[in-house]
Image: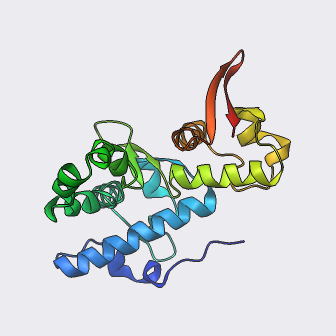
Amino acid sequence: MSFEWPWQYNFPPFFTLQPNVDTRQKQLAAWCSLALSYCRHHKLYTLDVMEAQESPVFNNKKMERKLSIEAIQVVFEELRKKGEFSSVRMCRLGILDSLRVQHTSLYLFFPLLLSNLSGNLEWLDKNKSRCLVMWRRPEEWGKLIHQWVSKNGMVNSVFTLYELSNGDDTEGEEFHGLEDWMLLRSLQALQTDGKAEIIIMDDGKGVKFF
């Protein structure tokens, strides 16, 4: 199935960040949506900014328009901060203070809550030249994996990470081919929920499902 480009992709001004604040916000939202959709379609989990500029998602060769390196970094920063607004807004609304005063146990787990509000991107270096892209959150991947385990009656079974992401049994599943770093985060999310336990095996890491 070929990737469906949004209408903005064939609109020349889309490839230049606009100075008007409202227009720019809408433009960045459209770029974030396009970048995540493209990565999801092609199952991309790691991006290099320089290479990204030459990829079809940021380079419309037919129209001879490409997004600048600086603009791509702005888009990526927007993806990184997607969950940040929610946490800041919670603090401004006094939700954090309310948790501290009324629900001490929930307040203690606030860092875990914030982790679920994290954005869709993480930088791999200080120069912001390479990044990890999370078009699906670790918790969502974990849920898909556990659903597959339960559906196939494999609860209490032990798997190597390789078997889960590259084994014949998982071929055709959405999580087949999942990169190790995301697979591990997904299993850690399941472990936090008491649905899995990550174990050390002779040939690396494995996991047991509950």
Image-quadrant location for residue 83? bottom left
The mark tally for this picture is 0
Image-quadrant location for residue 190? top right
Image-quadrant location for residue 88? bottom left
Q: Position of residue 198 (x, y in %)?
A: 61, 30
**Residue 53 seen:** yes
Which residue is drawn at the image coordinates 80% and 40% (left, top)? 167
Q: Position of residue 143 (x, y in %)?
A: 62, 54
Q: How is the image coloured?
A: rainbow
Residue 18, relative to residue 165: is it above or below? below
Q: Is residue 1 left or right of residue 189?
A: right
Quadrant including the C terminus: top right
Which residue is drawn at the image coordinates 21% and 80% (left, top)? 22
Which residue is drawn at the image coordinates 17% and 76% (left, top)? 21
**Residue 15 seen:** no
Extreme-front residue of the structure: 102
Residue 189, relative to residue 39: is it above or below? above
Front-lying residue, 120 or 202? 202
Q: Position of residue 45 (x, y in %)?
A: 54, 48
Quadrant including the N terminus: bottom right
Q: Position of residue 168 (x, y in %)?
A: 85, 43
Extreme-top residue of the structure: 202
Which residue is drawn at the image coordinates 68% and 72% (left, top)? 2
Q: Is residue 50 left or right of residue 144?
A: left
Q: Is residue 116 left or right of residue 146?
A: left
